[in-house]
Each structure stands twice: as C-alpha cells, then as structure tokens.
Image: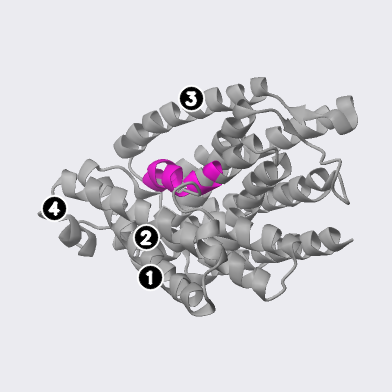
Amino acid sequence: MEHLIPDHWFADLHWTMLLLSTALSIVVLGKGADWLVESASGVAYRFGIPKIIVGATVVSLGTTAPECAVSVMAAIGGASGLALGNAVGSVIADSGLIFGVGCLMTTLPADRFVLNRQGWVQFGSGCIFALICYVLYTLHGADAEIGRLIGVTALVVLAAYLFQSVKWARQHTVAGPSVSPAETADTAPGDAEHETTNGRSLMVLFGAGITGLLLVLIGARVLIASVQVLAERLGVPQVVVASTIVAFGTSLPELVVGITAILKKHAELLVGNVIGADILNILFVIGASATSVSLPLVDKKASIPAIFLVLHLPAMLVILVLFRIFIFSACKRGHFQKWFGIPLLAVYVGFVALGFILGQS
C-alpha cells in the first residue's frame, strides 16, 4: 500500500489539505469497515459459519495486511527493528487497546469452542516466539537473529492453522456454538442480520467485502501518512511518531472493524478478529518478514540495542497472560466482563509510555 500511496505525496501538502485528507480517510475507513462487517456477517449467516470464526480467519487476514506490508518492506529495507516491533507492537495494540476498548464498550460474548482452540493457538504462538527469541539471544548475544528457516517454519505452521480452522468451523457448525444467552438472542434467525442478507447474492456479499477491505486499507494508509506529517510539523519527536502513530496506524483496521462490529451487534467478529490478528502477526507477519531476510534481534545502532527484548516481548507476554486469564473467566461466565478492559488498556498505555521514555534516553 505504501508503494501505491507513497509518503512523498503528503510531505509538501498544505495544512488545510492534510487536515482534509485526515478527515476524508476517517470517513473512508468507517464506510469500508461498515461494508466489511456486513459482508462477513452475511457470508457467515449464509454458510452457517460462526461469525467469531469468520473474524478469526477471513477478516483478520484482511485487517492484518497493513502490518504484513509494513514489516516486510521494513525488513527488506534493513529496518528489522521496525519489522519486529510493528508485529509484536500490533499484538499488544490488538489485545490491549482494541480488545480493551471493546470490553469497555459492551459485554463481549465468549464462545468456549473457539476460545479453547484458536485462543490457545494465540497464546502458544506468542509464548513460543518469545522463547525462541530469548534462546537465540542467550546463545548468540548481539548477533542473534531470526533466520529464514524460522520464517518458513512459521508460514508452514500458519498454513496448518488455517487448514485446522476450516475443520474446527465444520465441527463448530455441527456441534452448535457455545455462547451466552444474550449472544444467542442477538443472532437468532429472522433478526436484522437475516433482513440485511436476504435477497443479496453471495457475489454481492463477497464484492462488498473486498471493496470494504480495500477502503479500510486505503483509508488507514492515508490517515497514517497524513497524521505522521502533521505530527512532524508540530515538532513531535520521530521516536514518538514511530512508537505510537505507526504501531497504532497499522492496527487501525482492526480497531475500526471491531468498533463497527460492536455497533452493528456483531461483537463476536471483534473477539475473533483480535485472536486471529494476534496469531497472524506472529505466524504471518514475522514469518513473511523473516522469510524475506533474516531479522536481527538487536539493533546495535540504537541507544538501547536490545529494546525489543526488554520492552516489546515482556509487554506482549503480559498482555497474552492477562488475556488467557480473562478467557478462563469468560468461559465460565459466558462473556467477558467489562472491567477486563481496564488492565488491558493499562498495559498498552504503559507500553507506549515506556517506549517514549526509553526512546528519549
């Protein structure tokens, strides 16, 4: 997307044009997310596939595209720190910021079938990746890197996960969803969702979904570029722009789609999208980046060379452990409690604040 809409297009724009492009990108994001959510829920209804599984696979594959594009291009350009930081930072943003906001907005449903399957893949992939990084650093020190073999292995595991997700979807459809009564009421046949999809062909639904995804990606790209130029002109330090705007911006599609899903009474899409995006950020984004070129774990030119190991990975592990604890509770209650959003948001805010402090040291 950066090649189609390059940064230099925005560098010389007047203030008024930058503000206009920012406003228009927000409108495009909202409309794109609207179409994407309607399409995903419509296809799920037509095929009898649980929306949480659609969110964990199809929707998350689409909304993770910005992270993958940014990380692969950064890796090829020699900025491995940006590639790794963007992927892991997106896990923190997805589970901390997006899921935290979702919890505070509404009572999110807990589908035990999915949370005890895709949920464990989310937790396991993040923890195993962190373990691999620390083992490599212990063995090789400042020369440690994530090689292409690890990248290819991650992509193979990703393919296996997607294949298994299809099998789980079939099992889930046969067994029936394990959800709270409130969710069952929201998705009962004959409701607004049925009325929305009634009379619309699958071709129209798929077309709306693809168009919506493109609008989300284009809107996110324009918004990131516009806000980044505005921040630099206002004198905001580059490190702050990198650790907040870029990381937040690449997770913006998930945030917009998640909020739209809640507003349209499809909260299961948010839960599935966050879990699926976390898995894809580890297996897909880092896997594709490491397959393109080996990724050094230590930036020897940085003021804190091992910041990825001392900040990013610990923050990700804290988020994943908290998320897993909340899943245990949610599976018993049938839903995620609203207060779960507070500690998740606190970890995200703490991560951003520490990134700023350490970046200035």
Q: Position of residue 185 (x, y in %)?
A: 30, 62
Question: SS at mark 1?
Answer: helix
231 above or below 46? below
Q: In the rendered structure, which amino acid carries the disc numbered 1? A: Val
| Between discs 3 and 1, the one toward the N terminus | 1
Q: Position of residue 154 (x, y in %)?
A: 59, 27
Q: In the rendered structure, which amino acid carries the disc numbered 3? A: Ala
Q: Residue at x 55, y 46 (%)?
A: 67
Indicate left or right for 98 with 262 as reference: right
The mark tally for this picture is 4
Q: Are marks 3 and 2 in contact (CB under 8 Å)?
A: no
Q: Which residue is mark 3?
A: 160
Quarter of image, res 264 = bottom left
Question: SS at mark 2?
Answer: helix
Between the residue at mark 2 and the residue at mark 4, the CA separation in whole angstroms equals 18 Å
Q: Residue furthest left?
A: 199
Q: Which residue is mark 4?
A: 200
| Between discs 4 and 1, the one toward the N terminus | 1
Q: Which portion, as a residue range, is magenta? A: 53-69
Q: Is residue 99 visible?
A: no
Question: Which of label 1 and label 2 is nearer to you?
Answer: 1
| Between discs 2 and 4, the one toward the N terminus | 2
Q: Which residue is mark 2?
A: 33
Q: Are marks 2 and 4 in contact (CB under 8 Å)?
A: no
Q: Which residue is mark 1?
A: 27
